[in-house]
């Protein structure tokens, strides 16, 4: 069967690309081996953020007395937490299925393997093998959890984010191997649910601005998260009672042990390459991911690739925007999307978000720069909300005040960061932000004040 455009994978990369291609008039076929919505909806962003909301509500409950509401305690119904999460995921997956139908995108449920330069074999859910030829093919096959190359990862109780998000009980003692976004978000969520959590951290949230990471650590400690910094997991054994996790400090070589009933493996994610048989299509790749040029085109001119399968920044919004840009280019259109400005958020309490360069990166590039900072504690809205923790930091060129980066810790950081993203993707200056009226009383005023602070002109901070 000959098809105009075949997309492998219906995650936020593949399904968004399919809709955009259909809008541009293409006849699109999507092949999905598992679930529509991919990792993001079923085992990633949406599942964690549904659970993050439970965690946030618990932390808000603990502060209710500050608002004059005296509560007698609370009980967690974990079954209800899981069923609520499932309802959110199901609603979104159902919505995407309807959208794909409305755009007349053909969806084939099955696993795709290359059988030639433009030929795919698909083993369908119904047990058939289909042979499809694609004029153009987009690979959006995503990623899977990485497992540390050490002894004991197959022991009972050693799980990945896929299993933890679907677990039927709250672990008593949860150890987390990895302190990237996935490890930290899940650690903070289960800590709020009552697990005793220890995070084995080689480098805490290494993509974020260093000052922000320093400032957030006391909050993590206050919430009861035990951080084993500069450490790696070196081995896992089962004692009969539970897991024993050996760790080593990479700076001083000191060894230690942690006991836990559950160990979350969260050292990162690997691109989903294994069953694609890319050699048959002449698509170059290595273990980090598929190789593409600036247009997201692979070494086979009719095959493009996007999202987590490329390695790099594994984020849903990166996958989606690459998906739009790729099909626009594949179908002969110009694409004006800026793929180099990527907001990055961590959903915990307080939230973290960053876009553009960190202060460390600016220093490394030897750029002359200014920073401006404004604390949430001096913002009326944050105080009124009872969330005075946090700050906004802007980094700009010293000569022409062009914004280089923005970093936010605090309530709604994941929403506030988009003022920085918009400014960066239009090469704006500090003055473009400060000359724009920001409504009062809002958290967004902290962004304006931070931009003013870069030239010592903040109004509400001396
Ligand atoms: P995926 O979403 O992985 O989708 C790929 C799809 O392709 C899958 O459904 C898979 O079944 C299918 N597939 C693979 N191979 C084949 C094949 N051979 N044939 C047919 N189908 C195939 N990102 C954010 O931006 N924000 C967040 O808050 C966030 N939170 C996360 C939390 C967790 C716990 C995890 C694990 C990830 C999180 N991410 C988050 C990352 C985000 O989920 C991914 O970056 C995103 O899903 C990547 O999209 P994708 O389309 O490239 O791949």
Image (cartoon, rainbow, N blue to C red):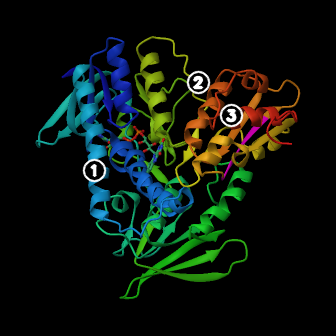
**Mark 1 or mark 2, whichever is nearer to me:** 1
Please tell me whether mark 2 sits on a helix, a strand or a loop: loop
Residue closest to the far front: 68
Where 137 sits versus 376, above or below?
Answer: above
**Looking at the figure, which quarter contains the N terminus?**
top left
Please tell me whether mark 1 sits on a helix, a strand or a loop: helix
Q: Earlier in the sequence, mark 1 or mark 2?
A: 1
Q: Main secondary structure of the magenta part?
A: strand
Split into quadrants, the picture shows ligand 1 in the one at top left
Mark 1–mark 2 distance (CA, rounded to whole Å): 34 Å
**Mark 3 or mark 2, whichever is nearer to me:** 3
Residue in the foreground of this view, choosing between 114 and 304: 304
The image position of residue 418, as x and y in percent, is 59, 32
Figure disc tally: 3
Please tell me whether mark 3 sits on a helix, a strand or a loop: helix
Horizontally, residue 52 falls left or right of residue 25, namely right
For mark 2, what is the residue? 338
The image position of residue 291, as x and y in percent, is 51, 36
Mark 3–mark 2 distance (CA, rounded to whole Å): 26 Å
Residue in the foreground of this view, choosing between 119 and 40: 40
Question: Based on the displayed image, in which of its 4 quarters is residue 248 positioned?
Answer: bottom right
The image position of residue 397, as x and y in percent, is 83, 31
Q: Which stretch is magenta?
A: 389-395
The answer to whether the residue labelled 1 contacts the one labelled 3, judged by CB atoms less than 8 Å apart, is no
Residue that appears at 68% across and 55% down: 213
Q: Earlier in the sequence, mark 3 or mark 2?
A: 2
For mark 1, what is the residue? 86
Count neighbours of disc 2 (C-alpha within 10 A) and say few if under 14, some if 14 to 19, many if 20 or more. Answer: few
Q: Is residue 206 magenta?
A: no
């Amino acid at each position: 069967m000959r098809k105009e455009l075949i997309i492998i994978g219906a995650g936020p990369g593949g399904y968004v690309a399919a809709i955009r291609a259909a809008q541009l008039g293409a006849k699109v076929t999507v092949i999905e081996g598992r679930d529509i919505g991919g990792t993001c909806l079923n085992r990633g962003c949406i599942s964690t953020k549904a659970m993050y909301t439970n965690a946030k509500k618990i932390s808000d409950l603990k502060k209710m007395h500050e608002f004059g509401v005296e509560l007698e305690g609370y009980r967690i119904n974990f079954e209800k937490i899981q069923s609520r999460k499932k309802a959110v995921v199901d609603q979104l997956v159902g919505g995407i299925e309807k959208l794909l139908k409305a755009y007349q995108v053909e969806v084939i449920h099955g696993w795709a393997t290359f059988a030639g330069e433009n030929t795919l074999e698909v083993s369908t859910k119904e047990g058939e093998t289909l042979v499809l030829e694609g004029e153009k093919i987009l690979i959006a096959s995503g990623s899977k959890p990485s497992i540390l190359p050490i002894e004991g990862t197959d022991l009972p109780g050693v799980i990945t984010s896929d299993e933890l998000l679907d677990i039927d009980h709250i672990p008593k003692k949860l150890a987390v191997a990895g302190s990237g976004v996935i490890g930290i978000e899940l650690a903070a969520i289960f800590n709020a649910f009552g697990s005793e959590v220890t995070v084995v951290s080689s480098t805490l949230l290494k993509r974020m601005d260093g000052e922000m990471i320093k400032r957030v650590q006391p909050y993590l400690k206050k919430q009861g998260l035990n951080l084993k910094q500069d450490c790696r997991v070196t081995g896992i054994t089962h004692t009969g009672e539970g897991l024993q996790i050996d760790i080593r400090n990479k700076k001083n070589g000191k060894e230690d042990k942690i006991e836990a009933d559950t160990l979350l493996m969260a050292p990162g994610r690997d691109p989903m390459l294994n069953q694609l048989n890319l050699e048959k299509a002449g698509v170059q790749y290595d273990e980090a991911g598929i190789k593409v040029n600036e247009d997201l085109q692979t070494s086979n001119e009719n095959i493009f690739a996007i999202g987590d399968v490329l390695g790099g920044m594994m984020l849903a919004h990166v996958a989606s925007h690459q998906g739009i840009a790729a099909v626009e280019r594949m179908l002969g259109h110009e694409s004006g999307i800026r793929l180099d400005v990527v907001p990055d958020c961590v959903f915990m309490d307080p939230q973290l978000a960053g876009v553009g360069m960190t202060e460390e990166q600016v220093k490394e590039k030897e750029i002359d720069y200014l920073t401006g900072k404004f604390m949430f504690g001096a913002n009326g809205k944050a105080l009124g909300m009872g969330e005075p923790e946090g700050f906004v930091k802007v980094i700009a060129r010293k000569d022409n005040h062009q914004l280089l980066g923005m970093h936010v810790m605090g309530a709604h950081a994941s929403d506030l960061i988009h003022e920085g993203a918009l400014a960066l993707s239009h090469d704006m200056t500090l003055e473009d932000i400060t000359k724009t009226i920001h409504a009062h009383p809002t958290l967004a005023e902290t962004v304006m004040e931070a931009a003013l602070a870069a030239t010592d002109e903040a109004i509400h901070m001396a």
